[in-house]
Amino acid sequence: MSGDRTACLTLDLENDWYFDDPEYDHLTFEYIDDYIAQIQRLNVPVTFFVVGKTIERYPEVIDKLDTELDSEFHLHSYQHDTSKSYDFRTEIQRGKDAFEAHFGYEPLGYRAPQGNIAPEEFAILEDEGFAFDSSVFPSYRPGIYSNLDKPLAPYVAEGTEELVEVPIAATPGTRIPVCQSYLKLLGRPYLTYLKYAPLPDPLVFNTHLQDFYQTASHDRLEQPKQSIMKRNLDESLELFADAVERIRGRGYEFGTMADIVGASARADTNLSYDESEDQLESRKTATQTDRSIRLD
């Protein structure tokens, strides 16, 4: 990464709206080719946080994204249970097993469903070998999280020695998340706001496939969530493309989570996770080597 400011596009790869009915299983995967074409046109790398069950059910989709895009993969829980009715360590271990069985190495990054992570869970992530987490929205969502006091830049997570928390982007002051769901909800006025508002560095821009593509799953959502999630959905891809170019126009270069964690380690002597940086680079190299073998 040579740019002074870094942006990272992330996508949480999961079942649409978490419905467990077989008729509504990952319906947005019908649009994978369209999504790949869109990302290739924008020429940006993508960091995927993928659910363990999704890896097990659709390994061919994971491989397609891995081979056709400049991509990086980390863990997004095993089952994406938003009720959190499970033992956290067991959930993490099951997710790690599914991840390693497919990729051949353990995940170094984690993102909690809905960004809902408890303070004591950071220590478990570190104990399980994770180098970083990217769950925290430094914003406010009623009933889910209240993180208005959290930093906008990477920091060592509370209760850990060196686990790096890389927060999802929010605008300083207003603390409005900079992600596709908010862009889709607020539409063109928010896109204009991004042209002038102060923005964090690094800027982690979060997305989901259901932010871009409407399926029958949307119609099963209860109100008012259904109306909220359908708002501006027909122009979501256009809004997204404009946002990417707007972020570039603000002087950002797009990279991966590994780029962000590595740069943070080099820049801040208070963040003592040089070993994690080396591990990230090692895993990236292993992934690239494996990809070359499969492409050949």
Image (spheres, helix red, strand yellow):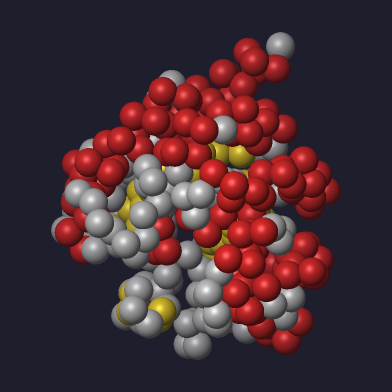
Residue 239's quadrant in the figure?
A: bottom right
The residue lying toward the viewer, choosing from 10 and 225, is 225
**Point 42% across, 38% down: residue:** 52
Residue 168: x %, y % from top left? 47, 65
Total labels drawn: 0
- Quarter the C terminus occupies: top right
- Displayed quadrant of residue 248: bottom right
Residue 226 is situated, as x and y percent measured from the top left of the image, at 60, 74
Q: In the image, is 175 to the left or to the right of 240?
A: left
Does any portion of residue 59 appear in the rendered image?
yes
Query: Residue at horizontal 56%, vertical 61%?
Result: 206
Front residue of 258 and 168: 168
Foreground pick, 284 / 240: 240
Q: Residue at x 28, y 50 (%)?
A: 163
Q: Where residue 207 appears, x then y in whole percent?
A: 60, 59
Position in image of residue 60 (x %, y %) = 62, 27
